[in-house]
Amino acid sequence: MEHNVFTVGAFALLGAGIAMVAGIGPAIGQGYAAGKAAEAVGRQPEAQNTILVTTLVTQAVAETTGIYALVIAIMLLNFVSGLLK
């Protein structure tokens, strides 16, 4: 079966959209972690600096999945723009 440029481009755009759905997971996880950190500071205000540092490190680790999805989506969009030139 032969595919034309527009079919390949359409599937690449669909893939970019699906890749961006992966941004939902990190957003939920980061919100949950930030809420728990706020609760921890409320319970132990003297440990605020330790809790803040730990929270920032875990937020950065949790964001990597969203960043990878964004990179894949940008690569697919660049692929489509190259097809249509």
Image (cartoon, rainbow, N blue to C red):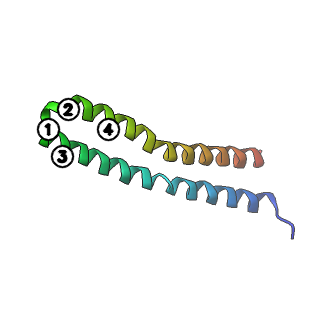
Earlier sequence position, callout 1 versus callout 3: 3
Q: Amino acid at mark 1?
A: Gln
Task: Give the structural element (helix, strand or loop) at label 2.
Answer: helix
- Mark 1, Cα crowd under 10 Å, few <14 / some 14-19 / many 20+, is few
Residue 37 versus residue 1 in the image, above or below: above
Q: Label 4 amino acid?
A: Thr
Where is mark 4, residue-wise? 55
Residue type (three-letter) at the residue carrying disc 3: Glu
- The image's mark for residue 7 is none
Residue at disc 1, secondary structure: loop
- What x and y, as percent, mark residue 69? 56, 48
Query: From the viewer's perspective, is 29 left or right of 20?
Result: left
Query: What residue did someone put label 2 on?
Result: 48
Give the image location of residue 57, x and y in percent: 38, 35
| Mark 2 crowd level (few <14, some 14–19, many ≥20, 10 Å Cα) | some
In the rendered image, the vertical position of residue 29 relative to residue 58, given as above or below = below
Would you name the residue on which mark 3 appears? 39
Q: Residue furthest top?
A: 49
Which percent across, then down, holds residue 8? 75, 59
Distance of label 4 from label 3 (alpha carbons): 12 Å
The answer for how far apart the CA atoms under marks 1 and 3 are is 9 Å
**Residue 44, label in figure:** 1
Residue at image position (64%, 56%) is 13
Q: CA distance from mark 4 to mark 2?
A: 10 Å
Q: Residue at x 69, y 60 (%)?
A: 10
Which residue lies at the image location 69% right of the left edge and 61% below the top edge? 11
Kind of residue at badge 2: Gln
Instruction: Name the quarter where the C terminus is drawn.
Output: top right
> Number of labelled discs?
4
